[in-house]
Amino acid sequence: MQTIGFTEKYYTLWSVGEPYEEKHYYNGMCVGSTWKRNCTFIQNLSFDLEIAKSKMSGEYEIDLELRGHSSFSRTISSDIKNREDYFPHDCFSFGIYEGTKIMECDNVWQIERAYQQEKSARRRACARRKLIELGVLVRYTWLDGNDKKNNYATLDLANSLNADKYFNSLEKGHLFKDGQKVEIEIKRIPSKSFSFKGNFGRTFIDVYATRCGKLVKYMGNSPADISSEKFTKVQATVKHDFYNEEAETKLINIKDLTDYSYMIHPNTEESAREIYELLMDGKNAPDEFLVNFKNGYKKLKLTKKDYSAPRELTYDALTRIGNFFGI
């Protein structure tokens, strides 16, 4: 069909073909069709529409939306399905697992991606249930940066938010008496502790919570080996200080008061090997052994030179302990 189009200044002549169907496939499935027409540019006609009409012979149409100077295929309509409708709503609609059931997948990264990016609410709900089942997601009410309420959070985020709540609940400022030597139980807060490298080596800022709900800090290059899982009884000297014009309490000369000595009995190879393997793992290395042998108790004492780091024994010390146990 002859058609008059328009482009900027000129009214133009086109030859517009009959509609034809173009089928579309995805992973072997026909997902719909697009109907198109081929539009072939012939020539410019005139600056004036009436003059352009006078140059036409036979039947013709006027379509002023037909623009340009080069031929192309024009889309008339399409019934291609939305990608979300390719697969059942309990299956992934994209990625390497597309078409497979979300609840049967154990790839956390892919499930988290589906939870965040799937358009279908049912698919996102499936992904959320699976993440809860895997222990990655938990029910937790919190507000994001835009004060939007959320009812779920990753386990790491929930732990971080709980740590912030716990940190904010601690009593801060100048605590105890300045210069006082105290015996207290403290627990390290990893999310608030850090270190940095300066002109005199690495400086550690360790932040602790006391069992009685107070916040104290250590600043120096030789931090004590304090657990973040449980409270450790220590002896330390209190130092009042200020940071950014805010009062804070620091601990200096921290000494771990935990009794790490062991008494091993009855005298069996199994009990000795159990303690030896504990030492080989570098966990809770004792300062002293009191071992019940057949001819009486024998004591093995460890000194500072036996440690390569806090609670970590040197190879020579481990060899001596092995010889002592006879293993």
Image (tube, rainbow, N blue to C red):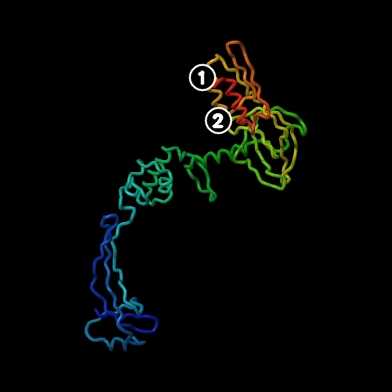
Quarter holding the C terminus? top right
Q: Amino acid at mark 2?
A: Asp
Q: Nearer the viewer, residue 62 or 291?
A: 291
Image check: 163 left or right of 136?
A: right
- CA gap, disc 2 to disc 1? 17 Å
Q: Residues within 10 Å of mark 1 (few under 14, many from 20)?
A: few
Q: Relative to 171, say whether 292 is above or below.
A: above
Image check: 316 left or right of 76?
A: right
Q: Relative to 61, say whether 29 is above or below.
A: above
Count of numbered circles on the image: 2
Label disc, if present, on residue 270 of the rendered structure: 1
Image location (x, y in percent) of residue 140: 49, 40
Residue lying at 34% horizontally and 83% vertically, measured from the top left = 11
Q: Amino acid at mark 1?
A: Glu
Q: Residues within 10 Å of mark 2 (few under 14, many from 20)?
A: few
Image location (x, y in percent) of residue 269: 52, 18
Q: Nearer the viewer, residue 270 or 178?
A: 270
In the rendered image, which residue does mark 2 sit on? 281
